[in-house]
Image: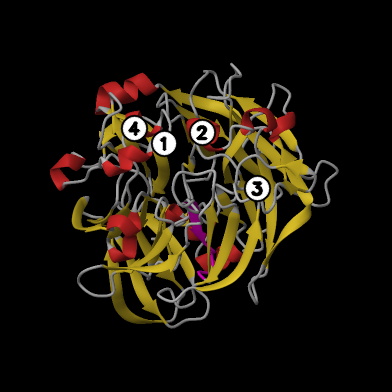
Amino acid sequence: MVKLCFLKNVLYQSKIIYLYGGIFIINLKSIKIDIFCLNQKGKEMLDQTTGPGYASPAEAVKAPKEKIVYTVCIYTGTGIEKPDYLATIDADENSPTYSQVIHRLPMPNIGDELHHSGWNACSSCHCDSSKERKYLILPGVRTSNFYIIDTKTNPRAPSIFKVVDGEEVKKKTNLSAPHTVHCMGKDIIVSMLGDAEGGSPGGYLHLNQDFEIVGPWTKPLKDMDIDYSYDFWYQPRKNMMVSTEWAAPKTFQPGFELDDVAKGKYGSKLHFWDLDKKEVKKTFDLGEEGLIPLETRMLHNPDSSHGFVGATLSSNIFHYHKERADPEVKKVIDVASIEVDFFPVPLPGLITDILVSMDDKYLYFANWLHGDVRQYDVTEPSNPKLTGQVWIGGLLGKAPEINGKKIEGGPQMIQLSLDGKRLYVTTSLFSTWDNQFYPGMKDEGGAMVVVDCDTENGGMKINDKFIVDFGKEPDGPSRAHETRYPGGDCSSDIWT
């Protein structure tokens, strides 16, 4: 249903400055705005202030502090024959169960390898009061199963609402290995890393609001000269989407082989799309400096075209923007590899996750092998300035223990609070890669750490009151990966 937004009791200059998907945006000069949405037939009045998410990134920053967080935990690949699960963690400093797992929701199958997740609704449909952020979508990378989790009925004890069978996904779309989940208004789009047989290049799965399989969201990626699939971010006001590359599931799932990089089995390209047409318009091969470009994040300002991508193996950060007709890409941060006697080549930082604070002031990223998390001031996106750094585990041995917990692993997934003051860090990358680089994680399990962030002057420090030790879970040591907040977070919400 196309929504037409109207303005009621507003003083404004009558000038339309943007039109996208049936939504009119006016160049307003008023102080207070009272916005209502009408469906195309004019029969339904929808108050914009009651839709999911927030009216703007600035409003998101002012949201209430998170009381609980969710993180996916895996037993896949650990030797423990138990299903992966969603853990609810108490993040309320005034609670007697602060920094503890207060609920565990096991999946109905073994061997999924839960990895990333996403919401059924976010700020992209804030104008629609018929929507609500109620369901967390948990796909399994290895099985392609999708678990739709009801987090609204009882946020502290979520439940499974629906299961989308992975074999049905493969049969209907010839796609497998789901990764990034984004809400696009009434649609849910998921990057898929492989075809039904685990080969490249993968594609994009389209689910409707009832979590039914619509089909592939784009034409075949091979028709657009895309070799691999991985992460993506979109910016509707710029008619822009950016996607990255990892490898075929049958390449990365067994573990990492350095020879596969030389054989071209891992990606090095960044793709810029026409969002409306769902077509790639420009591709950049980042070459040796941009091997395995994984996570990409754009600024939250919906009028900005600026963003960043972390080249994992090369351990570089690239800045991109599209201020002119064609996008521009430039390396802006270089994490130097370090000579060590226990690794066959100089040890890369291995940038495995990045994110941008909701106010677009700071860029954060994690070096999984080196063991550090960094904070950069990106007020000037093309010229980042290092403002903070902390150490959590890693192969360099600089922080083998945090708050009494031995860390086997390094900082991997990161999630920032909406106000930018708390960074939640987990330590597992992918089961077979964990086993390869951090074999001690099998017995120690994973961990969750909170890093306190100075939002005024920059700077970071480990919170000495928070540690979640997943080595002590009831069914044995598990590993934590991506974290989400019930109210949305810095890597889920996008504005139209």
Q: Amino acid at mark 2?
A: Gln
Residue occupying the far front of the picture: 341
Report crowding for label 4: few under 14, some 14 to 19, many 20 or more residues within 10 A (C-alpha): some
Q: Nearer the viewer, mark 1 or mark 4?
A: 1
Cβ atoms at labels 1 and 4 below 8 Å apart = no
Q: Which mark is residue 256?
A: 1
Q: State the CA–CA distance, disc 1 to disc 4.
A: 8 Å
Look at 54% across and 35% down and name the residue there.
434
The Cα–Cα distance between marks 1 and 3, rounded to whole angstroms, is 20 Å
- The segment highlighted magenta reads 351-360
Question: For the residues carrying marks 2 and 4, which lies nearer the camera in this image?
Answer: 2
Are the residues flagged by discs 3 and 2 in contact, CB closer than 8 Å?
no
- The residue that appears at 49% across and 51% down in the rendered structure is 347
Mark 3–mark 4 distance (CA, rounded to whole Å): 27 Å
Mark identifier at residue 251: 4
- Residue nearest the observer in this picture, 425 or 297: 425
The residue pinned by badge 3 equals: 393
Which colour assignment does the render follow? secondary structure
Question: What separation in Å lies between label 2 and label 4 (alpha carbons)?
Answer: 15 Å
Mark 2 and mark 4 lie on one chain; the one further toward the N terminus is 4
Q: Earlier in the sequence, mark 1 or mark 4?
A: 4
What's the distance in space between the residues labelled 3 and 2, CA to CA? 16 Å
Give the residue type at disc 3: Gly
State the residue position of label 2: 436
